[in-house]
DNA sequence: CTCGACTCCTGTTAGC
DNA sequence: TGCTAACAGGAGTCGA
């Protein structure tokens, strides 16, 4: 599913839209637009230029000339298609089919191209001027002091805390499982109970895992991924556990994740 | 404020 | 073979 890594690929693909003027939008799915209606999006976007493309965690942001910011969220099955080119063809847990009927929001440019959000399960959405301060620190560059602060004295399970986008932005289910597996820390530990050396190690492993899987091609390219169904630990061969943590399917090794 | 439970969405897959 | 039900998880809401 799209996590920080995929959204960064999307952002890079969307840079093809830099400097181009929006001539019209298509809004086949009214529910895809959050808080405001089609008229508001039309007024904010038409005749304006895309001046910058930014990303915070899993939120993709397009800065428009004259002020408004278009926020794009991709849920778990959303893809971006810019001028009929998709940076990602196959998405974990989504469909491999390419149905134009799954286009939920489309921006057309005056030069003829387009930026499309194609999302079978409709869990994504677009928003005008999203509250960027509602997102926590960017996971790909998180530092040890930042991680220590966001873990705090929380009595939540560690995995749930790491996936709380208001505290740490960008990690989804697959990235979090892979990171904790690499860091040798159990997802069910209490977030606020990590030792200082564990926090330092974990901050380093978050950055390293994001960087490594970005190079490999996506959040589904982890060493643990192939073992998510009835698998064994690639490190020590132990039978992996499958639990619900923070409401999410969680795969981890009870042998070395302590 | 904190944290867990619940809800929404729909294509895919497991099981009968 | 065909149908049904469970499953996937990002994000918002609600209540203890």
Image (tube, coloured by chain):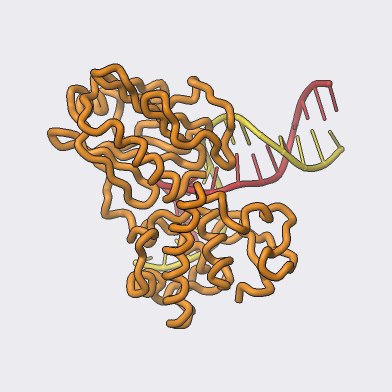
Chain colours: A orange, B yellow, C red
Query: Is A121 left or right of A225, judged from the image as shown?
Result: left
Query: Is A27 left or right of A224, judged from the image as shown?
Result: left
Question: Which residue occupies 47% across, 68% down?
Answer: A205
Q: Is residue A31 visible?
A: no
Q: Is residue A170 above or below residue A254?
A: above
x then y, percent, for residue A112: 29, 17
Q: Is residue A6 visible?
A: yes
Residue farthest left in this picture: A66
Along the line of sight, the residue nearer the viewer: A157 or A207: A207
Question: Which residue occupies 70% across, 70% down?
Answer: A236
Along the line of sight, the residue nearer the viewer: A212 or B15: A212
Query: Is A35 left or right of A157, judged from the image as shown?
Result: left
Question: Which residue occupies 50% across, 54% down?
Answer: A213
Query: Is A116 left or right of A112, judged from the image as shown?
Result: right
x then y, percent, for residue A221: 56, 51
- Residue A36 is drawn in which quadrant? top left
Q: Is residue B10 above or below residue A172?
A: above
Along the line of sight, the residue nearer the viewer: A194 or A256: A256
x then y, percent, for residue A17: 28, 31
Question: Which residue occupies 46% across, 75% down?
Answer: A201
């Amino acid at each position: 599913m799209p996590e920080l890594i995929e959204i960064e690929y999307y952002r890079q693909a969307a840079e093809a839209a830099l400097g181009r003027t929006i001539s019209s939008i298509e809004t086949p799915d009214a529910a895809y637009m959050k808080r405001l209606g089609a008229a508001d999006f039309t007024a904010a976007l038409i005749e304006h230029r895309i001046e910058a493309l930014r990303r915070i965690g899993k939120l993709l942001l397009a800065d428009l000339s004259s002020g408004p910011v278009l926020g794009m969220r991709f849920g778990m099955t959303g893809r971006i298609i810019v001028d009929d080119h998709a940076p990602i063809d196959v998405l974990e847990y989504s469909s491999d089919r390419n149905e134009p009927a799954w286009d939920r929001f489309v921006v057309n440019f005056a030069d003829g191209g387009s930026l499309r959000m194609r999302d079978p399960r409709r869990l994504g959405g677009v928003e005008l001027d999203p509250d960027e301060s509602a997102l926590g620190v960017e996971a790909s560059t998180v530092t040890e002091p930042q991680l220590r602060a966001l873990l705090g004295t929380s009595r939540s399970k560690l995995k749930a805390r790491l996936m709380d986008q208001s505290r740490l932005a960008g990690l989804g289910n697959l990235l979090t499982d892979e990171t904790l597996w690499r860091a040798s820390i159990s997802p069910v530990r209490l977030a606020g109970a990590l030792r200082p050396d564990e926090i330092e190690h974990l901050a380093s492993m978050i950055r390293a895992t994001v960087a490594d899987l970005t190079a490999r091609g996506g959040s589904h390219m982890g060493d643990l991924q192939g073992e998510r169904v009835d698998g064994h630990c690639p490190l020590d061969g132990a039978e992996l556990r499958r639990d619900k943590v923070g409401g999410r399917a969680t795969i981890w090794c009870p042998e070395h994740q302590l």
